[in-house]
Amino acid sequence: DNKVQHNAFSAIIVPGCRTISLSNLNKIKAFADAGGSVIFTTTLPEKATLLADNEKVKTIVNNLIREKKAVLIEDPSAENLGRVVDKLPAVNSVRFTGQERVNNMHKILNGKDVWYFANPGMKNKTVDIELNGIHKLEAWDPHTGETGKKINFTYRNGNTLFSLNLENGKSLFILADI
């Protein structure tokens, strides 16, 4: 654990590979056994980096799939990945409820939730967002320095919902309960 910047993950995406080290696969298996979601893309690992470990790799991968602790997305397009991620258990703090998505990051600083949303694309986007939990929100604009702008939001099923308009190439920090 990093005492300065602790990170927790609920899912791991394993890029398509036919060969994987047994030690890495054992870490992926331990992550899945602890409740994490594993997404393999394009192809499943079928060989180990050491010939002697090939059968162990096949057995672990097959068990992860059979036990539904892992899925394979053969065509890992953004759309296909989005469909799978949207079905994962709701342990993520952010869920996009509409068609549009933007880059995002969630951190907890001094006990407060902070989300960063960025639109690196070439077109303006309006995104519909659902945050786990009940929050009062405000926006901080890193481009203008403006802080304290209130966000219109609603609550549903214990979560906070809002829409965010992001121009192309722009970003916002959303702070909770300030």
Image: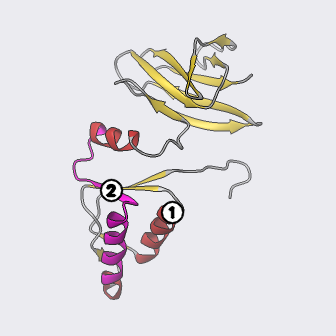
| Residue found at the far bottom of this picture | 52
Give the Cα separation between the discs numbered 2 and 1.
14 Å
Query: Relative to 18, is 102 above or below?
Result: above
Residue 25 is inside the magenta segment: no
Q: Are marks 2 and 1 in contact (CB under 8 Å)?
A: no
Query: Relative to 48, is 52 above or below?
Result: below
Q: Amino acid at mark 2?
A: Val
Q: Residue at x 59, y 30 (%)?
A: 115
The numbered disc on residue 136 is none
Q: Secondary structure at mark 1?
A: helix
Give how far across and how far down residue 81 sits, in percent: 32, 43
Which of the 4 quarters of the picture holds residue 124? top left
Per the rendered image, the range of residues in magenta is 55-78
Taking the image as shown, residue 164 lies to the left or right of residue 22, namely right
Give how far across and how far down residue 58 sits, in percent: 30, 76
Q: Earlier in the sequence, mark 2 or mark 1?
A: 1
Give how far across and how far down residue 98 sits, in percent: 38, 23
The numbered disc on residue 31 is 1
Q: Residues within 10 Å of mark 1 (few under 14, many from 20)?
A: some
Taking the image as shown, residue 112 lies to the left or right of residue 14, namely right
The residue identified by callout 2 is: 71
Query: Relative to 119, is 49 above or below?
Result: below
Taking the image as shown, residue 168 lies to the left or right of residue 45, namely right
